[in-house]
Amino acid sequence: MRPTIWLTSYPKSGNTWFRALLSNLDPTRDEPAAINALDSTDSIASSRGRFDNHLLIESGLLTFDEIDDL
């Protein structure tokens, strides 16, 4: 089982770079993690794709209040 690492911080404070670092520390990876492909390879609980797939609604069409309600 893969360990869960929670990363919380302010926007624009290096989250993506830190996620790339953590991904590249994984000894089971054959190739380095591409920073531009992290959204498709790593699991992010708040990612838009997960939200869209789970609710079958394109989140880009919703207001912030509607998203909060869901």
Image (cartoon, rainbow, N blue to C red):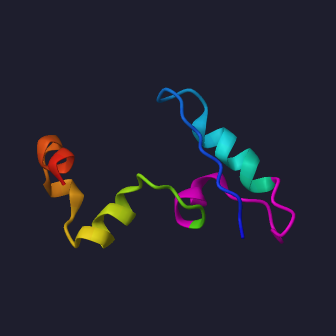
The answer to which of 43 and 32 lies nearer the viewer is 43
Q: Quadrant of residue 49?
A: bottom left
Would you say residue 31 sits in the magenta stretch? yes
* Above or below, 3 relative to 9: below
Q: Nearer the viewer, residue 41 or 7?
A: 7
| Residue at x-position 72% and y-position 59% | 33
Instruction: Residue at 13%, 42% (x, y): give it.
Output: 65
Q: How many marks?
A: 0
Indicate the position of residue 36 as horizontal and vertical percent values. 58, 54
Figure quadrant of residue 64: top left
Can you say which quadrant of the picture contains the N terminus? Answer: bottom right
Residue 29 in the image: state x and y as whole percent.
Answer: 81, 68
Instruction: Tell me if residue 66 is in the magenta stretch.
Output: no
Q: What residue is drawn where x is 41% and y is 55%?
A: 47
The chief SS type of the magenta part is: loop
Q: Is residue 38 left or right of residue 62?
A: right
Q: Give how far across and how far down residue 67 sits, in percent.
A: 19, 49
- Would residue 15 appear left or right of 63 to someone viewing this image? right
User: Quadrant where the C terminus lies?
Assistant: bottom left
User: Nearest the camera: 16 or 50?
Assistant: 50
Q: Which residue lies at the image location 32% right of the left edge and 62% below the top edge?
A: 51
Quarter of image, res 58: bottom left
Which range is magenta?
Answer: 25-40
- Left or right: residue 9 versus residue 23 is left
